[in-house]
Image: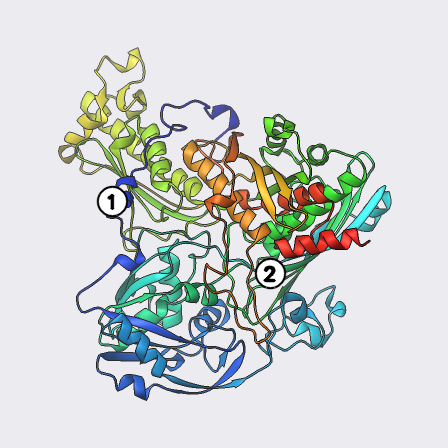
Amino acid sequence: MPKDELKSEYKLVGTRPDRPDGLDKVTGRARYGADFSMPGMLFAAVVRSPHAHAKILKIDASKALALEGVKAVVTRADFPDGLTGEDWNLQENTIANDTALYDGHAVAAVAATSALLARDAAKLIEVEYQVLPHVTDVDEAFAPGAPAVRPGSADHSVSSREVDLPDNVRHNVVREIEFGHGDVEAGFAEADLVREGTYKTEATHQGYIEPHACVGQMGADGRGEMWVCTQGQWFIRKFCAAVLGIEASGLRVTASEIGGGFGGKTTIFMEPLALALSRKAGGRPVKLVMTRSEVLRATGPTASASMDVKIGMKKDGTLTAARAVFRMQGGAFPGSPVDLALTCAFASYKLPNVEHIGYDILANRPKCAAYRAPGAPMGAFAVESLIDEMARELGLDPLDVRLKNAVAEGDKSSYGPTYNRIGLVEVLEATKAHPNLSVPLGPNQGRGVATGFWFNHGGETSVSVSVTEDGTATVSIGTPDIGGLRASIALMVAETFGIGYDDVRVNVVETGALGFNEPSHGSRATFASGKAAVTSAQSCIKQMCQRAADKWGIDAEAVEWVDGAAQPAGPNAGKFPPMTMKEIAETMGATGGPISGHNETTMDGVGASFGTHVVDVEVDPETGRTTILRYLVVQDAGKAVHPSYVEGQYQGGAVQGIGWALNEEYVYGKDGRLQNPIFLDYRVPVASDLPMIDTVIVEVPNPGHPYGVRGVGETGITPPLPAVANAIADAVGVRMKHLPMNPPKVLAAIKAKANG
C-alpha cells in the first residue's frame, strides 16, 4: 500500500480490548499440550544417553518388554533408512542411530499403561556404549586437532578462505559464509581510530514454562493424528512425516495452547517417538511429556558464539569500515544462526566498507533451535560493545554516534538490500528525549545504550474469513497464538469490516482446515496472518457489495462499504438505504450461498524493525553483583495493533536479554554432561530481579501492510546484552567480553583492574 494511503487513526486498531482467550486461560479451560487425554491412551518415556559422545554397541529391551503393561519399545531400527540432508538431521536428533552425539540424546523409547510404569521400564532398557572423545566449547571445536563430532560432515565447498582452515580444523566446520561490500582495508586506513575485540556468548535456553508435550496416534497404514504444543502445526506434520517415512496428508496435527516457545517450539524433538510407539502398539494413542531436565538436555537452546570484530571510526564518530568473523556451534548438526548473526550485526549503520565471515561448527551438544531473533543478540553484543568503547575513547556520546551513523530509507544495508521506509532515526530521537537519560547516577552506577535490528519474515500463509448467519465473522488462521495474535487479528478484521471487536471470532485450526502455514516465528504472525486476514475480509466485502448491488439492480462498482454496511457510492447510484453486514448475512443462503474469503500466499511487504535500549545498573564492587535500576525500550512497531501486547513483547525481550547477559548459560562438565538441567541451577530472571521496564512505541508505518504493521517480537532481545555490558563498563570501568556477566566474573574483572 502506498505510504500516503496509510491512515494513522482507526476506530479499533490501536486500542486495548480484553484478550479473547483470557477467560479460558484464567479458568483453566484452555488446553495445553499435557492436558490432552484419550481412551486407551498409553504413556511414553525416553531412554537418553548419559555420554556426550559414544558408540551405541547394543540395546536390550527384553526386561522392559517383560513387564506387564509395557506395550511397545522403539529404537532407530523402527525408523526408515535413506534420509538425507535436513530430514536425516531431524531423524538423527529425534533418535540416535549408531552414535549418541550429546548428553541427553534419545536412544530408545517405551510406551506403557501408566507414566510410572513407562519410567520404570525405561530404566530396564540396557544400552551398551563405547565412549568417544567429545568437545562442547565452540573455540575448542574449531581448534586444530579437536575431536571430530561427525566424521565426514565437513564442508569442503570451494571458498576463498579455505586455505585458512587446515583439515584438522575443517572437520567440524559444516558451513562457511562470506559476504560484504566496499574496500575494508581502505576504510580502516581512512579511520582516525581502529579497534578490534573478541567476544564470547554461551548457549542459553528459551526458558518457556511449558515443557514439550504431545499425544500421537498412528495406525499401521501410516495415518494418524497428533495434538501438540507447538508454534507451527504444519512444520510438525511435515517433519514427522519425513522422519517416519509417511505421507504428510496422512497426518493431521492440532496445536494446543502454548505455554511459551520463543522459537524453541518451531521444530520436532520427541513427537515422532510418540507416533512410532503408537504405530507399534497397534494404533493406541501415546502421550509423551518431557521433564524439565529433558527439555534442557535434549531440546534446542541457542548457539554459543565466539566473535572477532574490527571497526574503524573517524574523530567525529563516523564509521568507515567494519569486519566481523563469527564462529558459532549449533550442536551436533548443521544449523547455527551464524548467517543471521552476521546479517544483523551491522544492519543499524551506514557502512561503505564491510566484511562478514562466518563458520558453522559442530559440537557435542543438542541441535540448536531458534531463540527470538536467532543470532542477532550475539552479534549485537560484539558490535555494540565495541562501538560503545570507541565512542567513549573519542569522548563522544554513544547515543549520538549511533544517530550519526543510523540507516534510513534509501540506504544500502550492511547485508546488501536497500532499506525501504524504516524508523531507526525516529527510535533514536525518541530515546534521546526520554527522561530516563536525565536521571543522575550515583557511585558504582552506570548507563548503557545499545541498538538492535531484526529484518522480520513473511513466509507461507493461508487464512480464511467467513461471514456467519448473524453478521459476525469467523477467522481461521494457522499460526498459533503465542503473543496476543487472536486479539490483533480480531482488531484488524473488525476494523476492515466496520463491525465490533467482539463480533469477530479467531480460531487457530488444525492442518486439515487450511493450506500450508509456516509457524509463528520470525515475527511474522501478526504481519503475515493479519495481512492475509485483511485481504480475506476485503474479499468478503466485495462479495457483500455484489449481493447488495444485485438486490438494488445496480452495478457492483456503484456500491461502497462504509462502517459495516453496503451503500450506494453516490447520488447517481440511486437512493437505497444501507444494507448492514447482518442484513446481508441473514439472506445469503437465498442470494448466492455462503460468503467467505481466502488468501494463500508467500507473504511479501515485510518491514524491518529497529530498537534502542537504555539501562541503568549498579555494581557492588565487593561482590560483583549487578542490579538493574532502570530499563527503557524504544522500538518501532510500524503500527501497534494492540499496544498492550506490543509493550509486553518489548518487556519480555528485555527480560530474556537481561537473563542472558547476567546469569543464563549452559554449563558442561569435563565429561560433556550438562551440569545445570533444572531451573534451580539454570537461573532465569524473576520479578524481584527487575525494575518496571519502561517502553516507548514508535510508529513509522510499514507501507507493505494495510495497517502499517511491523513484527515486534524479536528485536527486543537484541540490544539487552550489549546495553548491560556497556552499563557495567560505565559503572566500574571494566569491559566484559564473555557472557554471562555473573558476579564472579565481574568481581574478577574489578580485581584484575585494581591490580593493574
Q: Is residue 37 above or below residue 70?
A: above
Q: Is residue 151 above or below residue 426?
A: below
Q: Nearer the viewer, mark 1 or mark 2?
A: 1
Three-letter amino acid code at the position of disc 2: Ser
Q: Is residue 529 above or below residue 97?
A: above
The spot of residue 699 in percent (x, y) is 52, 29
The spot of residue 726 in percent (x, y) is 68, 43
Circle 1 residue: 27
- What residue is shown at x 73% (from left), y 70% (from top)? 165
Specify the farthest residue to the left: 590
The disc label shown at residue 304, or none: 2
Helix, strand or loop at mark 2: strand
33 vs 137, left or right, is left
304 vs 278, left or right, is right
The spot of residue 54 in percent (x, y) is 52, 81
Determine if residue 405 is in view. yes
Q: How is the image coloured?
A: rainbow
Crowding at mark 2 (Cα within 10 Å: few <14, some 14-19, many 20+): many
Sequence order check: which comes first, mark 1 or mark 2? 1
